[in-house]
Amino acid sequence: MDDYAESVLSVVERIPSGRVMTYGGIAEFLGAGGPRQVGTVMSRYGGGVPWHRVVNASGRVVPGHEQEALRRLRAEGTPLRGDRVDLRLAAWWPDGPLVASGQGK
DNA sequence: TGCATGACTTTCC
DNA sequence: TGGAAAGCCATGC
């Protein structure tokens, strides 16, 4: 478990229900590495966090677990559009470094 | 040190 | 948003 991985998982854990975050968004928020690294970390340590709240820039969910992710997102009330996530409404961004209260602006 | 690989992104049509 | 092509970053062998 690297420090980078922990940071990524921390951000994912702060994603509120009904909201999602893109790999690029997480990478940008951390200000380190790139989207691919975030994806790699999720593939290895994403088992302990709401990974279904992490999608790519196209709004597509995790490959291999699309049905599973969509099922959970739908249960949380995430704005879905068929098999894709409506990023325009679901896209979320952390307010502070450790503040999990403040949500969408 | 160098090449291949991967839960990706951005640009163009 | 949707598909195709090129580019980026870090890791593994």
Image (tube, coloured by chain):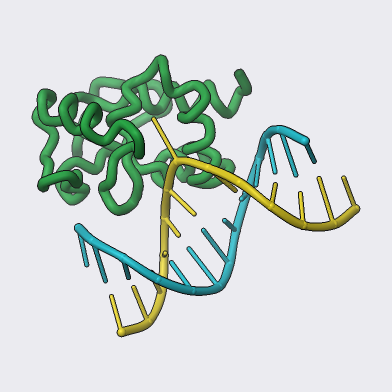
Chain colours: A green, B yellow, C cyan
Residue A67 in percent (x, y) is at 21, 32
Tell how many labels: 0
Q: Is residue A13 left or right of residue A90?
A: right
Which residue sits at x=19%, y=33%?
Answer: A70
Q: Is residue A94 visible?
A: no
Which residue sits at x=49%, y=37%?
Answer: A38
Question: Which quarter of the image is occupied by the N terminus of chain A?
Answer: top right
| Residue A17 placement: quadrant | top left
Q: Is residue A89 above or below residue A44?
A: below
Residue A29 in percent (x, y) is at 44, 40
Q: Is residue B12 above or below residue A33?
A: below
> Along the line of sight, which residue is nearer the eye, A54 or A102?
A54
Which residue sits at x=23%, y=27%?
Answer: A68
Which residue sits at x=37%, y=27%?
Answer: A12
Q: Is residue B9 left or right of residue A74?
A: right
The residue at the far top in this view is A48
Residue B1 in percent (x, y) is at 90, 53
Q: Is residue A82 visible?
A: yes
Question: Which quarter of the image is occupied by the C terminus of chain A?
Answer: top left
Residue A87 in percent (x, y) is at 21, 48
Q: Is residue A77 left or right of residue B9?
A: left
